[in-house]
Amino acid sequence: MSDTTWDALTATPLPEVRRRAAVVDDLVGIDPVTVPGAHRLAWNDGGGQSAVWYFAEDGRALLLTFDHESELNLYAEDDFALQESFYAGVPESLVALVRDRPENYESLNLTDPGTGRTIHYAGGVFWYDGSRWHVADGLAEYCRREDVDLFGESGFAYCLAVYRFGRDFTPEALVALRDEKGRYEDEQAREADASALRPARTAVGIVPARRDESRGVRRSYCRGRHRGGLRMRRVTYAMSTSLDGYIVGPDGGFDWTAPDDEVFRFWIDEIRTVDVHLLGRRLYETMLYWETADQDPGLDEATREWTALWKPLPKVVFSRTLSAVEGRARLATGGPVEEIERLRAEPGDGEIAIGGATLAAQAAEAGLIDEYRVMVYPVLVGGGIPYFPRHERRVDLALVETRTFPSNVVYLRYRVT
């Protein structure tokens, strides 16, 4: 049994694992939870995915991972017996850390209908015996029997990405985030913190939405898109907008969306998560520049990095006038809804990204958009093409990430609930 993230975790000394868990817990702002006999640290993305660590006083540890969109979402099934079976093989003294405990944002309970006893819901159950990590026997057996991707469907790979096991950290990102949150009284305190931090790198700018400890959280845990028992790829709509909500101004211009170095770096990291990009004709023609941009010897390193990611990315272009497209692009053979449904049915872990308001409007009308991602620029343009599609139905959203850049640009990521 092997997985890149699993191999990296098992090769990391427990004190370093605990240090990274503490850094992430602090950065995300997890509410403290007291667990007798262990120190609890956690991470959540504000939308139903969580990792919870229990570092026991005797040097052992328990790790639970949760992904509400996975095949192992037992909370949605409300199956206490199956959930308890996932803990098989874990010493009872560790399982006791999650039995009959109060619920909290990262840890919801399943209840035995016969006895009333509870146990924390977890798609993934892993434990450390003092010298090495183990996958819980019950979880491993279930995944073998049902032919389930253990590390993918348990949320392990997704939830542990933030800890970057197997990769070096640097202190700059941590200090910058703390600085944004007003942690330092002056430059001297900032520099002292930077000096104290050993090399570390983590995801930055993640600020969970306000936490609903009841109905909203439960609903997000039970929501997911599946077909034939397989998790379907997420559909996202990301664009830069003015503060009054337009992606293009009334004169057809959008020069105010030119990204600075930090925003550009953010988009570089975002494009890495995409498997296929859907574009309308206008956006496709705008992005044609990148098909030959790498021939310019004067490009800086970041621009070359973006080009190297964008060029090989599969693209689907929707147009009534184009007869041919270039590079890794292809012309759509159907409408946006048909193409998205076809793409979701194909294997893959990356996202299906939509570029352009017209395509997004059709996908939104069919209820196919999973996340709205908005880079808001501090400018009012007074009209033009709006970011949000106009349709006559309500769509409830949960804020799962936000980031403010030094240029006063604000990134917002919302998940459809």
Image: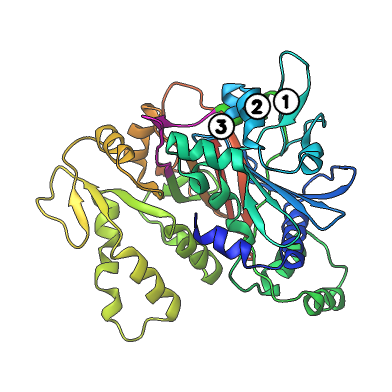
Closer-to-camera residue (95/52):
95
Closer-to-camera residue (224/357):
224
Q: Give the image location of residue 118, x and y in percent.
A: 76, 25
In the image, the segment drawn in magenta is 223-236
Report if the CB atoms under discs 1 and 2 are less than 8 Å apart: yes
In this picture, residue 339 sits left or right of residue 305: left
Give the Cα separation between the discs numbered 3 and 2. 12 Å
Three-letter residue code for mark 1: Ser
Mark 3 or 2, nearer chain start = 3
Closer-to-camera residue (42/400):
42
Q: Give the image location of residue 135, x and y in percent.
A: 61, 48
Closer-to-camera residue (115/357):
115
Does any portion of residue 164 appear in the rendered image?
Answer: no
Mark 1 or 3, nearer chain start = 3
Three-letter residue code for mark 2: Arg
Circle on res. 218: 2
Report if the CB atoms under discs 3 and 2 are less than 8 Å apart: no
Three-letter residue code for mark 3: Asn
- What is the quadrant of residue 48 in the picture? top right
Residue placed under numbered mark 3 in the picture: 73
> Looking at the figure, which quarter contains the C terminus?
top right
Q: Secondary structure at mark 3?
A: loop
Which residue is at 39% across, 53% downward?
274
Residue placed under numbered mark 1 in the picture: 214
In this picture, residue 150 sits left or right of residue 123: left
Residue 55's place in the image compared with 305, above or below, is above
In this picture, residue 337 sits left or right of residue 47: left
Which residue is at 66% across, 23% downward?
80
